[in-house]
Image (spheres, rainbow, N blue to C red):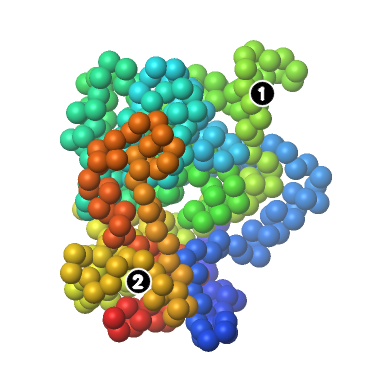
Amino acid sequence: MRRKYNYTAPLLLKFPDYIYRGDVLKEIKIARPFITDEDIEAVANILRSGYLTHGRVVEEFENKFAERHNCKYGIAVSNGTIALEIALRCLGVGFGDEVIVPVFTFAATANSALTLGARPVFCDIDPETFNIDIKCVEDRINKRTRVIIPVHLFGHPADMDPIIKIARDYDIYVLEDAAQAHGAKYKGKPVGCLGDIGIFSLYATKNITSGEGGIILTNDSQRRDFMKIFRDQGQTAKYFHEFLGGNYRMTSIQGALALRQLERLDYINEIRRRNAKLLNEKLSKIDWIKIPVEKEWAYHVYHQYVILLKDDAPVTRDELMNYLRKHGVETAVHYPRPLNDQPLYRKLGYDEDCCPIARDVSKRILSLPVHPLISENDIDYIVEILSKI
C-alpha cells in the first residue's frame, strides 16, 4: 500500500529564506537536495543494521522504481554514467560502432560511448525544447550506427515517436537518457521505458537522489540478467565468474535513501512544476527573456528551469549571472559549451561548426532556481531583481 504524505509549508520553513552573508541579505541556491527526517532515519537504520552493501532494500527500490515507470525490470548501479556504459555494453556497442547523441547535453552521454571505443555522432537541437533535432537523427545514420540516445533534457521529454520509428526502420536501438527526467511523461507514458533501455541518475541535485547512484530500466529479461551480472564482477554465483564485469553495485545506504525519495517523487515534481508555473507567469512580463516551453504532449518535471536571453536583452548572459549573484541569487549554465566544442572532442577532430543552434543557445541560456526548497517569496524576489534591469 502506497504511503500518503502530507507535506506542508512548515516543513519548508526549516530551511531559512534569509541568510546574512556580507552585504547580501538573501541567498537562494540553484539546487539543494530535499532531505527529510524520514530519509535520514532510513539511512541510519541501514547503518545500525551493519549490512551496508547491496541488499534487499536496493532490490525493493529497483522493483518500485521500475513499476513507477511502467517497466518490468530495474537494475540499480553506482551512478548514472555507469548506467549509460552498462546499457551500451548490453546493446553490443563496441569498437567501430557509432552512437547518435544530442550535442547539447552533459558529457557523460557521449563519453560512455567513447569509453567503449565507439564514436559519438552529434546532432543539433530543437531551439524550443533543447532536445535532439529529429531531422538530424536520420541524416546521421549509416551502416555503423548501432544506437540513438535521446536525452530528456532538463526534465522535458524528447519527441520519442519519430525517434523510435527511425530506429525501427533502420534496425538500431534506442537508449533513453532520462538522467534528468524522473517521472516525466511523453504522451501520458513515463519516460525511461519507451525505447529498448532507459537510464536515470540519482546524483545529489536530481529530482530524487541517493547522493550518487543510477538505475537502468528494461522490459527484456535477458538484458536484465546481463546487466545484473556485469555490475557484480561478472558473477552468476559467488566466486563463479562467467565473464568480465566490474563492481558497479548500489549500496544499501544509497538504496534506503533512494527508496524513501521515490515515495515522494510525485510530490517533489508537483512542487517543481508549481515553482516553474509561478516563474513562467511572472517572467513572461519581461520581454527580453524567453521562458521554458512545455509541449502539449509532454509532462515536464523541471530538473532545471532554463531561460534564454533574447537577442535584444540589455545584458549578456554572464553579466546577468554576476548581477544575480551580487543580489544573492545563485544561477548556473547548463551547458556553456556544446560537446563538439569541448577540448576532448576538438582534439578528436570534431567540427566546431557542426551544430549552430546548440552553439548559439549555449551563449544565451541560464538556469534559475526551481527546486522544492525555494518559496513563493523567493520567486517574487528573483523576478523583482530581474525586473530592475
**Gap in angstroms between the C-alphas marked 2 and 1:** 48 Å
Name which residue lies at 64% across and 47% down: 254
For numbered disc 2, what is the local secondary structure?
A: helix
Query: Could you tell me if residue 86 is visible in this image?
Result: yes
Q: Is residue 317 above or below residue 98?
A: below
Image quadrant in which you'd find residue 318? bottom left
Looking at the picture, tell me which residue is in the foreground, 157 or 365. Answer: 365
Label 2 or label 1, whichever comes before in sequence order? 1
Residue 233, numbered circle? 1
Few, some or many C-alpha atoms within 10 Å of disc 2 (few <14, some 14-19, many ≥20)?
some
- The three-letter code of the residue at mark 1 reads Gln
Percent coordinates x, y for residue 24 in the rendering: 51, 84
Name which residue lies at 60% across and 62% down: 35
Question: Which quarter of the rendered picture does the C terminus lie within?
Answer: bottom left
Name which residue lies at 29% across and 35% down: 351
Percent coordinates x, y for residue 101 in the rendering: 34, 35
Q: Is residue 327 above or below residue 271?
A: below
Residue 120, numbered circle? none
Labels 2 & 1 near each other (Cβ < 8 A)? no
Name which residue lies at 69% across and 47% down: 253
| Residue under label 2 | 320
- 216 to the left or right of 252: left
Percent coordinates x, y for residue 128 in the rendering: 22, 53
- 378 to the left or right of 21: left
